Amino acid sequence: MFGILRTLWLTFLHMGHRRVTVGYPEHKPPLPPRYRGRIILSRDPDGMERCVACNLCAVACPVDCISLQKAEQDGRWYPDYFRINFSRCIFCGMCEEACPTYAIQLTPDFEMSEYLRPNLVYEKEDLLISGTGKYPDYSFFRVAGVKIPGKDKGEAEREAPPVDIHTLLP
Amino acid sequence: MATILIDGRACPARTDENLLQACLEAGADLPYFCWHPELGSVGACRQCAIKQFSGPDDKTGRIVMACMTQVTDGAILSIDDPQAREFRAGVVEWLMTNHPHDCPVCPEGGECHLQDMTVMTGHDSRRYRFAKRTHRNQDLGPFINHEMNRCIGCYRCVRFYRDYAGGEDLAAFAAHNDLYFGRHEDGALESAFSGNLVEICPTGVFTDKPFSAVYSRKWDMGGAPSVCAHCAVGCNTIVNARQGSVRRVINRYHEAVNRYFLCDRGRYGHGFTNAPTRPRAPILRQGGIPVPISMATALERFATMAKDGPIVGIGSTRASLESNFALRCLTGPDRFSTGLAQLEHDLTMQVPALLRATPARNPSLHDMESADAVLVLGEDVCVTAPRLSLALRQTLRRAAFPAADAAKVPHWMDAAVRMFGSDAPSPLMVLTPAATDLDPIAATAHRAAPDAIARLGFAVAHRLDGSAPDAPDLSETESRLADTIATALRTGRRPLIVAGLQYANAALIHAAANIATALHATGADAALSLVAPDCNSMGMALTGGIPLDAVRTMARTGHIGTLVVVENDLTRRLDTATLDELLAAVPHLVVIDHIATRLAERADLVLPAASFAESGGTLVSTEGRAQRFLPVITPTMPVQESWRWTQQFTRAATHADAPEWTNLDQIVATIAHDIPALSRIIDAAPDAGYRLDGRRLRSEPARISGRTAVRANISVHDRPLPQSPDTPLSPSMEGAYSPDTPGALVPFYHAPGWNSVQSLNRFQQEIGGPMRGGDAGARLLDDGIPAQAPEWHHDIPAPSTAAPDDLLLLPEPRLFGTEELSALSPPIAARVTPATLRLGTLPAGLQDGGMVSLTLAGERLTLPVRHDPALPPGIALCPPHLAARAFTAPVRVQLHRDDTP
Amino acid sequence: MTVPMPLIIGVTLAVLLGLATFLTWFERRLLGLWQDRYGPNRVGPGGILQAVADGVKILFKQDWIPPFADRGVFVLAPAIGMMTVLLSFGVVPVTAFWSIAGNLNVGLLFVLAMMGMGVYGVVLAGWASNSKYALLGGMRAAAQMISYEVFMGLSVLGVVMQAGSFSMRDIVLAQSGLWFIVPQVLGCMVFMLAGVAETHRLPFDLPEGENELGAGFHTEYSGMKFGMFFLAEYAGVVLISALLATLYLGGWQGPLLPPPLWFGLKTGALVCLFILLRAALPRPRYDQLMALGWKILLPLSLLNIAATGAILLLHAPG
Ligand code: SF4
Ligand code: SF4
Ligand code: SF4
Ligand code: SF4
Ligand code: FES
């Protein structure tokens, strides 16, 4: 009983407290870098597309709003098209979580309202940025074993040069 | 049946299997790599370690390799035992030390047995911090990608390629950690079964190259059960598609037919479905100019044409039963043609009758594997029925079983059994005009002209049963050969005779029938298999019709108003002059097809048909097994099934009795009703009303991705996916899925924890046994009532009396290039080699590789010559269709002496 | 001094509906204030036009009746809810001369009767919707409202005994010396709690119970029919506040300021208290609500009657 009255009283006193609401859009709140907003596709430190079209983001997405098609050039995989239907996206970040290359990243930008839903369908041209995003150093192909232009077999991180299969010596 | 205890659970097990099989059959998750249900065990990977206890009091137990230990009644096992777990985790961790960081860019990812097993053993982070060994890859041709870094050294590839399929050009190189699996140098893998490496290799070393170009993860593709359309064997396949295009074909297990393997023609031959040249709209040719028209206009045009006289239909041996039958309904049985020229027509019609009348068994492929004496009579099965040749190859392995049994070595103990096999005599005997891939492993391989082979065959039959007619005037060698063959066949308890229509020689198949009859009379469990040329040749034989020659006669006498040709490129059947004459006498030509053919270029009306991937239908394999294929893509109008076109024609031409089929099942029912020989095709597969747990079966995996984005560039609004009335499979991921799905309806293989094709184990009643949901297809020819007394064929050819420079030119079908549909598939086309003329003796002054000209099927050709000393005299070989388009049956030719064209 | 009847009716109706509409905005602003937020502050000065915007929106919404609903009853239910509340105002005396029904001698009984009728609005809404959430909401409403009607009725008996009349005006006049809140503090408390429960306002809004029942009895309602429930609820808040002011706080009486203003002030303060309850208190469990009623409020109100009666008897002249 007393507790109830005390609650009432304390709530009443909140009349004098400062309001925490930020008056957007007059005041833009500072957003942390890991805020989950508009999704981008980043590039690796060499300026190449990071996405290797592995489809893991697409399969991780709980609302199935990512679709892409793999293509290949000299051993590098990349998406032929990469489409996110933002009118379905719930900005859960599962795609970023699933991405093995840090290609897909959510950014602190959420101002993407549109009057027409088709305008919320972003293609690769709309998603691909020219920088590395949150992860400046990582490059998947420097770790992976496949051969790409500029990186021969055995030249990835922690790789020995290709073996000579004509010898039986240990 | 024995009972074994797995972690305290009593499970039934067969005593002729190993513990790994028993555990898998009991539903346990036991990881493995080197064991394969068809290849047996070698105990190379050490991944299948479990604990075995010697009795209830044994608390220590010992670690054994499950795949190398025989099931014994009452065996006490533990998969969960901490020591066994640790052992297995250790094995995977070691295997992974050199494994590249490749999964995201590995086409195996998502259906990778290595991924599955790594997860199953719980290995999740790498402790090894040193350098990984790496390998250079090889270019293995248009079918297979090579990425050797990913190899875990399980040896499955070479065991399949060399031991099982008899390939020579894939081997293990180097040693220890550096082990390398590849060719001695870059180049296309030669084996006709190289594509199976994709499914055999548990990692991403060998992957499907054409698929990689249109790659999609397994979870993103819809699947549908299908039947291979590239030869008459009728291998079961799964077709995968995404966004309306076919992505790949993989094996669908059928216990009695193709089991675990396909040939490369079947796996890579589907490219024609995505061809840019495919007709996608009705085309009207007005004054030589093709104009796309609407469906309604097309039907109107047809109705107008139909007024100009009787309609005659030409069906096709590559079209489904339904397509042919609907055409037959349009024209009536008297005006429906099989689309085969007289000779082929007669022979094709004979095949089912022969199989029915002969008392010997008509074996399935799996059945053939256990034959203990095999005579191949004048058919190069390695190219006309590749998967069948692989089955014949397995008879060699069976030959080792008696010795293995005597030594108490179980049959799954692969390496040991093969060791015994090296001493066992080969049960194979091959009589063909030219060398075949089976020759190297055959006990007898003899070269002769088709007629001579037939004579030999008759002679063998006579030696087996004196009442059979003998071939007169055999030479000394021939007589001795006939004796040898007869003796070998007589020793077999399950002898098998294989012949076919390759050389369009009736005497050959009659001789084969005589031998089979004679063998049966000796009390042996004899079998006769006749290889038909096309995927639905047998269906056509059972449907019946008139030969093309009869159509020509009708045309000449002005009895054709409109000629409707369904899925048949007559330019491959009739030479130019004959075809011109036929078409000139026909006022209207209508072609329904799903590929762009030369005939279609001359048609007044071309209608786009649905390919096998977009339609449902029934094919009858050479074994007489009716098998259903189902659509994986719902065709977008105006592309529709041939039978729907012809049905609409029937309506448009206002026939009184226009059939009212609204789905596949109804036309199947009509066929079964109207043609008694086909009455059992209803049982080929469950109908579209089939429901599992009250629901349709889903055609897409539950975790398909991108459903709300894949069409978003066209429309952001959801739309219900079009449901085909012909299939019990839903077009989406909604629906039931279970390992109890009937074999005829399996859209893809998946089991919890088993994302790769290895999940198939869960779908079988026992490993390598029938499907839990029942096997696909219905055999149609088992109802023959053979005559009491053996009936002999007497059409023994006379010995050859040909002039020395008179050549008999035989068709030499190729694995790639001579089959019509697969030749249109880019990867197959890349393997087609130019046509040559193979000659036994080169005419004076001609070098190997030199050019020679001849007139063939109305065409004057100049071909390079290949010298093949093994060929019998007076025989030349040339691939059908490749050089002269209409060349299919043996002809006598003369080489032009002067090289002036 | 008499005011013409049509004028009284018109003004009362206008003021009431205006007030209810205003309250929809005012409540949100006040909640915001107490919860350190703003509430609707964008439309018009201070956001006041939000109420208008909401009204427009709700008027233009598709007025949809679910195909599975019992159409007649479905339409009738919100009307009943609204009617009963509005009718109750008929007997509330704003000043000595300003009340629609004049000095109805059974005024208080009429109010209780109307409250009893009000139950039908909610129950029928839940029933007619023919959906499980609505039905559960309606059931809860029936049990809750009928129970609390009992305590409400019992709690005001003390007032009636003291005033010796059911007439509202008499009751107010009886308080010219001492507001009844002093002698009837128990009754006042019970009445107030019962009032919250009767209007199914937070924290006693179990018939709606958003987190478990969707929106309870009005789950299936949309458009203006929903609007009617909504407005009726706010009108109900005003009604209970007005009754509290009348019965316990001396109605229009007060020094200096003119009587209508006093009445307004008291009612307004009580409305704010209602809103404060919503801002501060969580919703109890349903069984807790019923236990509170039957195990605490009922004995309390009976005690109140007994005590009042005893004291009255003791002081009775003669
Ligand atoms: S944030 Fe979530 S919903 Fe949006 S695309 Fe990524 S996974 Fe899908
Ligand atoms: S998970 Fe990353 S790398 Fe893979 S497809 Fe998505 S964005 Fe590309
Ligand atoms: S083989 Fe399997 S585990 Fe290895 S990279 Fe490919 S998908 Fe990954
Ligand atoms: S290439 Fe594949 S099948 Fe062959 S040994 Fe390596 S992992 Fe095994
Ligand atoms: S599966 Fe048993 S050792 Fe490889």
Image (cartoon, grey):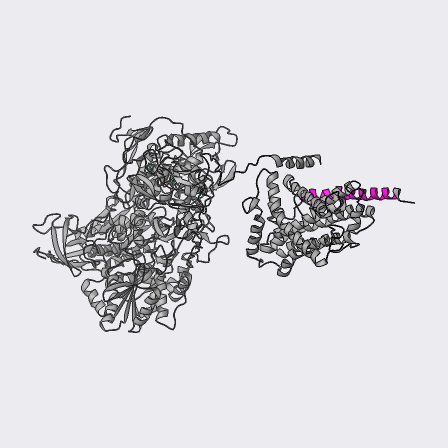
Q: Is residue C125 above or below residue A169?
A: below
Image quarter (top left, top right, bottom left or bottom right) of the C terminus of chain B: bottom left
Magenta segment: C286-314
**Count of picture labels:** 0
Above or below residue B578? Residue C22 is above
Q: Nearer the viewer, residue B791 or A90?
A: A90
Q: Position of residue B895 (x, y in %)?
A: 11, 56
Residue B752 versus residue C26: which sits nearer the camera? C26
The spot of residue C46 in percent (x, y) is 57, 44
Q: Residue furthest right?
A: C318
In the rendered image, residue C294 lying in the magenta stretch gets the answer: yes
- In reply to whether residue B486 is colored magenta, the answer given is no
Q: Is residue B203 visible?
A: no
Q: Most prominent secondary structure in the magenta stretch?
A: helix
| Residue B180 locus on image (x, y percent) | 29, 34
Q: Nearer the viewer, residue B818 or B870?
A: B818
Q: Quadrant of ligand 5?
A: top left
Name the image quarter holding residue B725: bottom left
> Is residue A15 in view from this perspective?
yes
Residue B71 at x, y = what percent? 44, 38
